[in-house]
Image (spheres, rainbow, N blue to C red):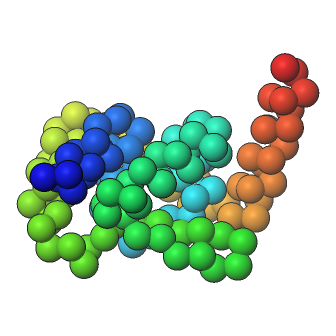
Amino acid sequence: MDQTLSIIKSISDKNRLRILNVLLAHDELCACQITEFLGIAGATASRHLGLMVNAGMLKNRKQGRWIYFRINREESSLVPLLEWVKGQIQESGQAEKDSEALKKILLIPCEELSRKQRKSSAFTKAKE
């Protein structure tokens, strides 16, 4: 029962549903791509991703400086939930908007995205 609750909590947020949806369409994405896609601070994206990994919804792997996330397709009990979520998001129209936004982001190398995010973070801190 605790695992079920953890899974449900891990997708009970608009940004986490958006992460799940784009990962359903792509094998895996770098944390910097997900951060850019959501338009949120890296720490916030990390919190969302960590929650989903801890619940077993996502898997991650590290490659050099980069951490890549993918849906945990090894857990067959998640398949019906993933299909249901995908259908609900498709009906909302959000999936199409997100797909278009992500296409542009995927054209930018991870190194450049990270540099941009570091500059943005530094600028925000300097203003505070």
- In-front residue for pair 54/58: 54
Q: Position of residue 113 (x, y in %)?
A: 71, 55
Q: Residue furthest top?
A: 128
User: Residue 106: in sight, yes or no?
Assistant: yes
User: Residue 26: in sight, yes or no?
Assistant: no
Q: Position of residue 78 (x, y in %)?
A: 17, 63
Quadrant location of residue 40? top right
Q: Position of residue 23 (x, y in %)?
A: 37, 61
- In-front residue for pair 120/2: 2
Above/below status of 29 relative to 1: below
Instruction: Tell me which residue sits at (90%, 27%) in the image.
Output: 126
Instruction: Tell me which residue sits at (81%, 29%) in the image.
Output: 124
In what quadrant of the picture does the C terminus appear?
top right
Q: Residue furthest front?
A: 2
Instruction: Tell me which residue sits at (61%, 62%) in the image.
Output: 107
Above/below status of 67 relative to 112: below
Q: Position of residue 111 (x, y in %)?
A: 76, 64
Side (left or right) of 37 relative to 58: right
Side (left or right) of 124 relative to 33: right
Side (left or right) of 5 relative to 106: left
Side (left or right) of 1 relative to 98: left
